Image: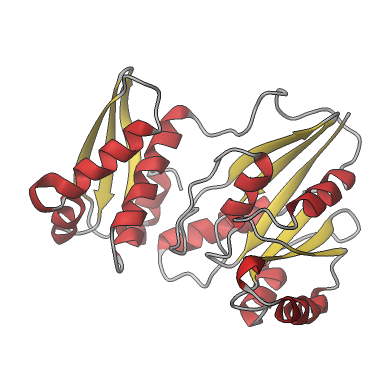
Amino acid sequence: MRSGLVAVVGRPNVGKSSLVNAIVGKKVSIVSDKPQTTRRRIHGVAMRDDAQIVFVDTPGLHKPVTALGERVNATAMASAVDVDVLVLVFDAESGFGKGDEWVAANVSMDRSATKLFVVANKCDAVAPQRILSELSRSTILDADEYFPVSARTRKGLDELSAALFGALPEGPWYYPADATGDVSDEEWVAELVREELLRLTRDELPYSIATRVTEWEWPRVRCEIIVERESQKGMVIGRGGSLLKEVGESVRRQMDPGAYLELRVVVDKDWQRKPGRVERLGY
């Protein structure tokens, strides 16, 4: 038996969660086109024969300006400690740059014990010569392996997966053979609600939203949507409750049949700038 921890790090919105979901073969992290979608450390489990990878999907590393930003940065950095492989992902469309170098410099790793893989994601939208050029620029990191992939089309994922499984040491599995992740039902529903709000809201509003399940008496589930200002409450509810209704309908389709989902919007002024409140919300 072989097993190992693989931490996936990178700047916001480079496709880390999409990459983990694609290799695991199941949606274990929510995704959106907005930065800072992932706020917690999430484990995704991939199996092959006698080997088990536990992926650690981390928040995007960035220069924080709020207590929430500081907390998610700390989560990402702590997640990269004592892993077998560190996968640094960059966006092939944007190219490898100073921000990616900053991520590598701010993640602590023991190169004698941890392999470093660099992954250029979103390669389906980039010309081959450009991909080669950007990967060449990333060799400044002196990684063990370099991979061009597309999480969306799965191009290059077989090669990346094979290399990851091949890097695992001998050891017992961390999770049962049928496990795919470690997120509880309550946490998953809250994340699905936030994912839909990320999809439907605009401008700065997504960063002011937090979600949490406050009641789980199946089939009745109540989820709170926390915003920072009274004016944002109406934006989340929508005209005549239209936006909130759309969120609820979409999330219910992803839950077990018969679920009754109640959504409630509350205001907690400037919550993401208050360290204590950020912690109480589970970040």
In the rendered view, would you say 14 is above or below 166? Answer: below
Residue located 90% across and 40% down the image = 169
Q: Nearer the viewer, residue 105 or 172?
A: 172
Left or right: 55 with respect to 243? right
Q: Nearer the viewer, residue 251 or 44?
A: 251
| Numbered disc total | 0
Residue located 21% across and 52% down the image = 236
The picture quadrant where one finds residue 217 is top left
The picture quadrant where one finds residue 224 is top left
x then y, percent, for residue 139 = 82, 77
Left or right: 126 with respect to 161? left
Q: Nearer the viewer, residue 93 or 261?
A: 93
In the rendered view, would you say 219 is above or below 100? Answer: above
The picture quadrant where one finds residue 166 is top right
Q: How is the image coloured?
A: secondary structure
x then y, percent, for residue 280 = 38, 43
x then y, percent, for residue 188 = 45, 36
Left or right: 182 with respect to 154? left
Q: Nearer the viewer, residue 71 or 95?
A: 95
Residue located 73% across and 76% down the image = 128
Q: Quadrant of the N terminus?
A: top right
In the rendered view, would you say 270 is above or below 20? Answer: below
Left or right: 126 with respect to 174? left
Residue located 20% across and 41% down the image = 245
x then y, percent, for residue 79 = 66, 51
